[in-house]
Image (tube, grey):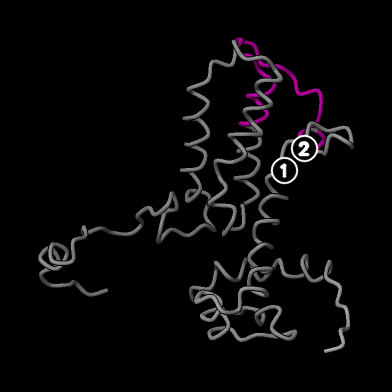
Amino acid sequence: MGCVENVEALATKLGCKVGSLPSSYLGLPLGASFKFVAAWDGVEKRFRKRLAMWKRQYISKEGRLTLIQSTLVSLPIYFVSVFTLLRTVRLRLEKIQRDFFVEDGALERKTYLVRWTLVCLDKRKGGLGVKCLSSLNKALLCKWSWRFANERGALWNQVIRGKYGEEQGGWCSKEVKGGYGVGLWKAIRREWHIVSNRLSFVVGNG
C-alpha cells in the first residue's frame, strides 16, 4: 500500500485518529487472520484476567459453575459469532474453564473425574448445562445463514448477494470459492447444511 501524504492533517480535519492494522474494534482485532492461533490470544487473555479477579478458594463449586455459565462462556461471544473457532483455541479455553471448576486454589492439582463433554450436556441428559463452545460457535454462525435468508433488504445482505450470488430460491448464497478476502462469509456459508437439513417447506395457496 502506498503512503498517504498529509495523513495527520487529514485525520485532524475529519476528527479521527491515525491508526494501523491490526487494530481493535468492538473487541475484534481488525486486519488479523483468525486462521492463526495467535489471533485468538486476546480471548484467552480475557479469560485469565477475569479469573484473576475471582478468589476461587472462597467460591463454592456451585458458584464456580454459575460464573462459568454466566461470564466465561460469554466472553468470546463476539469472536465466535463471526469466526470459526479453531480446535486448538477451543481446547485451551475449555481447559481454563475446567481447571477453574475443578481446582479450588490449592497447590496440588486435582484429577478430572468426568470428561468436559459430559459436563456440557443438558441437565436432562445428566450434564451440568455448561455451553459447549464448539456447538455455540456453530449455532451463532448458522444464525447468520438464517438472517441471510430473512433479512434480504439489509445492506450487508445485498452486498453478499451481489458479490457471491444466490441459490436455492435466495435462501443461501452460492458456495464461496477462492481465497481473496472471503474467509468471514466462507466460514458462515460452510455451515449452511446445518440449517438446510432442519428446514421444511409448506406449499401455500398463493
Sequence order check, earlier mark of 2 and 1: 2
Q: Position of residue 21 (x, y in %)?
A: 33, 59
Find out whether the residues at labels 2 and 1 contact each other: C-beta distance under 8 Å: yes
Image coordinates of residue 185 in percent, x first then y, are 58, 70
Q: Is residue 107 above or below residue 95?
A: above
Name which residue type carries label 2: Cys
Numbered disc 2: secondary structure: loop
Task: Name the image quarter holding the C terminus.
Answer: bottom right
Residue 138: quarter of image? bottom right
**Camera-side residue of 3 and 83:** 83
For this rendering, which residue is in front, 91 or 143?
A: 143
Query: For residue 121, what is the image quadrant?
Result: top right
Is 117 a magenta residue?
Answer: yes
Q: Give the extent of the magenta segment.
A: 96-118
Name the element at disc 1.
loop
What is the three-letter code of the residue carrying label 1?
Cys
Residue density around tag 2, few if under 14, some if 14–19, many if 20 or more, within 10 Å: some
Residue tagged 2:
120
Up the image or down, 205 lies above or below 122; here it is: below
Q: How many marks?
A: 2
* Residue 143 image position (x, y, % from top left): 67, 62
- Which residue is more in the foreground, 205 or 145? 205
Q: Tell me how far mark 2 sits from mark 1, CA to CA.
A: 6 Å
Q: Which residue is mark 1?
A: 132
